[in-house]
């Protein structure tokens, strides 16, 4: 029996629980919750040893509202860990992650903030999130921030602004992982040129396999190998399957013809529900293809897993919930992945990146004080200006 334990880079259970007011008495994840992708019994069946819980807020929340909602998400994760203290443990360091993975009875809980709008253009807020346990920040979500371009928005900055580079530098100083999922390739390149620590993609796959802007181009994967980071492959069907991607593009074009704003993901979900052509299935084989490509281009030391469970409305056949990681690992074994390869994929790579980021932080904290720069001083933009946002409530 395999002793591999998965460290998954991205799960949106906290946002799913927001819909019930974070009431773990009403939705008790110690028991089966079939309306979710995630509960404790299935985490154990899946061999999940540690999970980055996404503390996501949509781009429709800006300024102080975004900060407040992020703090509520963090509070919900802390409440969840306290309620299920026999199962979950807060992890904020590489040492803590290694200790937890060595304990078969505990599931490590890490925090990742999804979307740079969560810091409201404030390095002080960024540092406060770190003090609360957040160990990665995804620089954008589906729309640009005032200092970084998103993969799914019209270019506004050409990558990172001066303040955006300062955000990356301050994350390096603290030891917070720079997450490049959701960002534009220009932002990826700028972040890789700026960072002194390895970066992650918490839930992205290979653009050469499926041409979706949320995926990572090969030239970036090559840079990622030099950087020492890790790309944690996601399971989102329209990110991994060219067939599903083509269906989604066709549906989006039909929606726009019907007057539906394709940037309004709530409206698009409603449109897709009535779209006459059903969504084709994605499969385990699609994920295997992405992992094979990531390994070929970046190397076995730079791949990981970031399923995005409870942040999506559909999942691949065979990977229906968090209990199914062994199915994927068996499919990789059938492709001649060794146990050493699978150990790297499931936990060793992300643990190494976490530790390397900490070591960079130890050096930088001695070399420079916390930055007091503002977006006004670096970019000439009024503090906390925010950007115009459409409704965006799908965390993937």
Image (cartoon, rainbow, N blue to C red):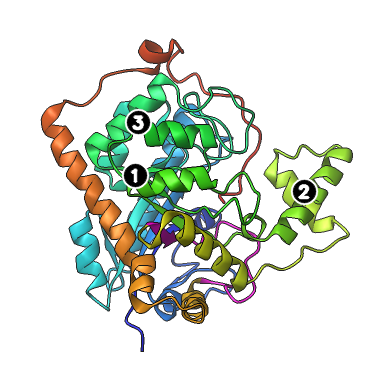
Q: Write down the residue under mark 1.
A: 227
On the picture, is 370 further left or further right than 375?
Answer: left
Magenta-colored stretch includes residue 319: yes
Q: Which mark is residue 249?
A: 2
Please, what secondary structure does the residue beneath circle 3 have?
Answer: helix
Which residue is rendered at x = 32% and y = 27% of the image?
Answer: 123
Structural distance between the alpha carbons of marks 2 and 1? 33 Å
Please give the name of the residue rendered at 61% of the width and 72% of the height, measured from the top-left corner. 285
* Left or right of residue 238: residue 106: left
Disc 1 element: helix
**Residue 142 percent location from the top left of the image:** 58, 39
Q: Position of residue 359 (x, y in %)?
A: 18, 45
Vertical order, 373 against 178 (above or below): above
Looking at the rendering, the stretch of residues picked out in magenta corresponds to: 302-321
Q: Is residue 122 visible?
A: no
Front tag of 2 and 3: 3
Query: Dot 2: within a 10 Å radius of its alpha carbon, few (fewer than 14), some, or many (20 or more) residues?
Result: few
**Which one is earlier in the sequence, the residue at label 2 or at label 3?**
3
Q: Residues within 10 Å of mark 3 (few under 14, many from 20)?
A: some
* Relative height, residue 186 to residue 16 (above, below): above
| Residue 274 position (above or below residue 318) | above
Q: CA distance from mark 2 to mark 3?
A: 34 Å
Q: Which residue is mark 3?
A: 194
Left or right: 339, with 140 as reference point: left
At 32% across and 81% down in the image, what residue appears? 3
């Amino acid at each position: 029996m395999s002793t591999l334990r998965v460290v998954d880079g991205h799960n949106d259970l906290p946002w799913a629980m927001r819909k019930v007011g974070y009431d773990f008495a009403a939705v008790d994840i110690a028991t089966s919750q079939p309306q979710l992708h995630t509960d404790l019994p299935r985490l154990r069946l899946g061999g999940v040893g540690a999970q980055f819980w996404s503390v996501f807020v949509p781009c429709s929340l800006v300024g102080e509202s975004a900060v407040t909602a992020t703090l509520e998400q963090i509070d919900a994760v802390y409440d969840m860990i306290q309620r299920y203290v026999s199962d979950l443990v807060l992890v904020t360091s590489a040492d803590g992650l290694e200790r937890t993975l060595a304990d078969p009875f505990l599931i490590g809980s890490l925090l990742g903030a999804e979307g740079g709008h969560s810091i409201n253009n404030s390095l002080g807020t960024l540092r406060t999130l770190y003090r609360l346990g957040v160990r990665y920040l995804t620089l954008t979500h589906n729309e640009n921030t005032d200092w970084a371009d998103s993969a799914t928005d019209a270019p506004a900055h050409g990558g990172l602004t001066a303040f955006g580079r300062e955000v990356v530098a301050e994350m390096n100083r603290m030891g917070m992982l720079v997450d490049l999922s959701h960002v534009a390739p220009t932002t990826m390149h700028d972040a890789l040129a700026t960072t002194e620590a390895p970066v992650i993609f918490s839930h992205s796959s290979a653009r050469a396999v499926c041409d979706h802007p949320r995926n990572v181009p090969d030239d970036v994967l090559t840079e990622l190998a030099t950087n020492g980071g890790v790309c944690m492959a996601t399971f989102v069907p329209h990110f991994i399957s060219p067939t599903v991607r083509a269906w989604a593009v066709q549906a989006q074009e039909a929606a726009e013809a019907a007057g539906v704003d394709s940037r309004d993901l709530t409206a698009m979900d409603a449109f897709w529900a009535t779209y006459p052509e059903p969504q084709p299935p994605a499969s385990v084989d699609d994920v295997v293809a992405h992992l094979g490509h990531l390994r070929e281009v970046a190397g076995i030391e730079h791949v990981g897993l970031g399923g995005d469970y409870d942040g999506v409305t559909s999942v691949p056949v065979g990977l229906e919930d968090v209990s199914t990681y062994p199915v994927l690992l068996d499919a990789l074994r059938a492709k001649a992945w060794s146990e050493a390869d699978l150990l790297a994929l499931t936990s060793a790579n992300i643990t190494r990146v976490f530790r390397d980021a900490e070591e960079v932080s130890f050096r930088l904290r001695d070399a420079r004080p916390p930055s007091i720069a503002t977006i006004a001083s670096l970019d000439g933009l009024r503090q906390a200006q925010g950007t115009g946002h459409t409704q965006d409530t799908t965390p993937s």
